[in-house]
Image (cartoon, helix red, strand yellow):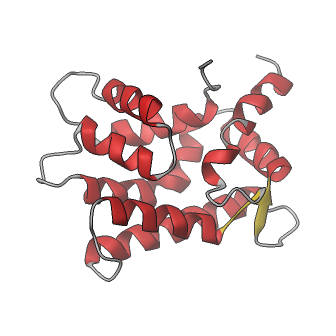
Amino acid sequence: MDSAEYERKIASRFAAFDQDHNGSIDREDFSRAAAAVLAEFSVTARSDKGQDVYIGAEAFWQGMAGIADVDGDQRVSREEFVTGAAKRLRDNPERFGEIARPFLHAVCAVADEDGRGVTPEAAARVMRALGIEERIAEGAAAALDADGDGRISRQEVLSAFAAYCVTPEQPQ
């Protein structure tokens, strides 16, 4: 895959991070994502799990800004995202997932309502809360349960996130 094609694939994910659709990614987008997940599972921001989600979102934002906010304006433009993410992912997609790890782990703790792991249904709820279309969210969540045991591990979530970031959109 050539560099231009690779960067187009990365750019296709920009909108998922731009929660308010203002053309840039900033700290507020990560706070919105945290609030949306907590609201979906009726978890308060002041609870331990709620605080962990916000702390994870802040860590994710800091990691994103660290790799992509070239001009230091506390916003990541589409161009900065493409350049920063492409640089981080080119050799190892798991590396980008590492900056998301605290947020993803905290979200898994919220979505794991019975302490036995995240169900595909709960994973789909998370994705829908983050703005992913219902049909896509449900299909993606079902695919996460590769062994068919009805549970999705945190490592599977992390790996799937990294893969999602480098996979182009499917035709609708």
Pick the front one: 121 or 110: 121
Q: Is residue 129 above or below residue 36?
A: above
| Image quarter (top left, top right, bottom left or bottom right) of the N terminus | top right
Question: Between 68 and 171, which is closer to the camera in this rendering?
Answer: 171
In the rendered structure, the answer to whether residue 94 lies left or right of residue 120 reads right
Q: Residue at coordinates 41% horizontally, 29% vertically from top-left?
A: 140
Question: x, y (%) of residue 147?
Answer: 22, 21
Specify whether 23 is left or right of 103.
Answer: right
Q: Is residue 163 above or below residue 58?
A: above
x and y, in percent, of residue 146 in the image: 29, 22
Question: Farthest right residue?
Answer: 71
Q: Quadrant of residue 158?
A: top left
| Residue at position x 76%, y 72% in the image | 74
Can the viewer see residue 133 in this picture?
Answer: yes
Q: Position of residue 136 (x, y in %)?
A: 46, 30
Query: Could you tell me which residue is drawn at 35 percent across and 33 percent down?
Result: 141
167 displayed left or right of 22 = left
Q: Residue at the bottom extreme?
A: 46
28, above or below 148, in the image: below
Q: Quadrant of the C terminus?
A: top right
In this figure, what is the number of numbered marks?
A: 0
Q: Name the side, left or right, on which 12 lies relative to 149.
A: right
Q: Position of residue 40 (x, y in %)?
A: 33, 59
Residue 90 in sight here: no
Q: Residue at x 80, y 49 (%)?
A: 78
